[in-house]
Image (cartoon, rainbow, N blue to C red):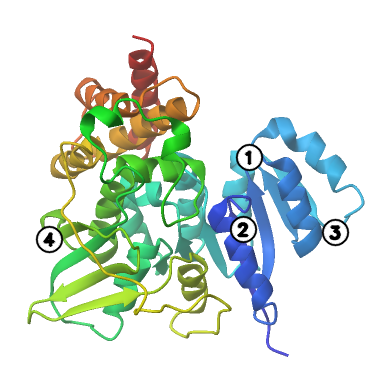
Amino acid sequence: MKKRQQICILGSTGSIGTQALEVIEEHSDLYEVYCLTANNRVKELAAQARKFHPAAVVIANEAHYDELTSLLADEPDIKVYAGARAIDEIVEADPIDMVLTAMVGFAGLSPTIHAIKARKKICLANKETLVVAGELICQLALEHHTPIIPVDSEHSAIFQSLVGEDGNEIEKILLTASGGPFRTMSLDRLSTVTKADALRHPTWDMGAKITIDSATMMNKGFEVIEAKWLFGVPADRIQVLVHPQSVVHSAVQFHDGSVKAQLGVPDMRLPIQYAFTFPKRLPLSSERLNLFTHPLEFFEPDLEKFHCLALAFEAIRRGGNMPCIVNAANEVVNRAFLEDRCGFLQMGQVIEQTMQRVSFDANPSYDTYVQTDAEARRVAEELLRF
């Protein structure tokens, strides 16, 4: 019997993590869960552990350690750990073949670095890792011969479009965006939208943080930064196209004028599974695309209305630790908006002011990123109080 691939899922209780478990369950003859981690959702983590019987579980928030231990008291074969350091250590475990990094935010950076150094295949769903430290991550992956396979639907689409195109020059990357729930809304109307409005995404079912980022289009700005590092294409050759139907997940234009795209229904299980199985494709019990019922429309993004996207492009232009500053400020205002402490348009204003106030470093190290993240969060929180 062929040995099953051992998978560690960082952020197993989130949207990507739960769908990854569905993929693993569908192909249980090929894949097995070695470790599951979560931040605060202790009951959900315990339920997943009971179903999939991993060797270990880690709860990042140490305050939940006793509760998790109690919930799994009758599962003696499952080791229970807590804390950020435990997550860094667990990804290095010898039996692990691949690590799905589905944690949200800056917290995903350190364990991804540890997994790369341990030469685990990285299935990358944590976009902040490349946004904050793209140059460092790419250097480490090259140094340790660690493959990074993108899981974001857009970057997976680009990756799939490039298969078989080794050596062919990329003229342009066409990065599609749904436009979120406010695509056709006026700037005046945006000043009054609520978190309930923003959380109603028209095509994708995602976690709260990324859904808000989609509504502001900061998510797309981050994806431009990711694409720059993943595919070695400068940002001025990455074009954002608003595509409300979310059928064309992204495309690549080559220097002969040919365009290759990956299409499919909005279902994150497909890019997750492809990251697991590359270069092979396995069957997936999902809805099939019917092009007779799906019009394909494309529009230019409104950078005045979606100021966060413009700020992301500015961060790319500045380079250094500026994307790290933008990411940290965005995490703060995103959370504040979800907690009704910040208006929708105020998010972009606070991010822009944070960019102006935090110390800029053109050649950051890992320690610089950590310090920048902390400083930017402090400044953004202060700005929210005024």
What distance separates the C-alpha of mark 4 from that of mark 3? 51 Å
Disc nearer the start of the sequence (2/4): 2
Disc nearer the start of the sequence (2/1): 2
What distance separates the C-alpha of mark 1 from that of mark 4? 38 Å
Farthest right residue in view: 74
Q: Which residue is labeled 1 in the image? A: 60
Residue 336 visible in this rendered orientation of the protein: yes
**Could you tell me residue 211's position as x and y percent?**
43, 45
For the residues labelled 2 and 4, say whether their Cβ atoms are less than 8 Å apart. Answer: no
What distance separates the C-alpha of mark 2 from that of mark 4? 34 Å
The amino acid sitting under disc 3 is: Asp
Disc nearer the start of the sequence (1/3): 1
For the residues labelled 1 and 3, say whether their Cβ atoms are less than 8 Å apart. Answer: no
Disc nearer the start of the sequence (2/3): 2
Element at badge 4? helix
As drawn, 121 above or below 82:
below
The amino acid sitting under disc 2 is: Thr
As drawn, 127 above or below 69:
below
Q: Which residue is labeled 2 in the image? A: 18
For the residues labelled 4 and 3, say whether their Cβ atoms are less than 8 Å apart. Answer: no
Q: Nearer the viewer, mark 2 or mark 3?
A: 2
What distance separates the C-alpha of mark 2 from that of mark 3? 22 Å
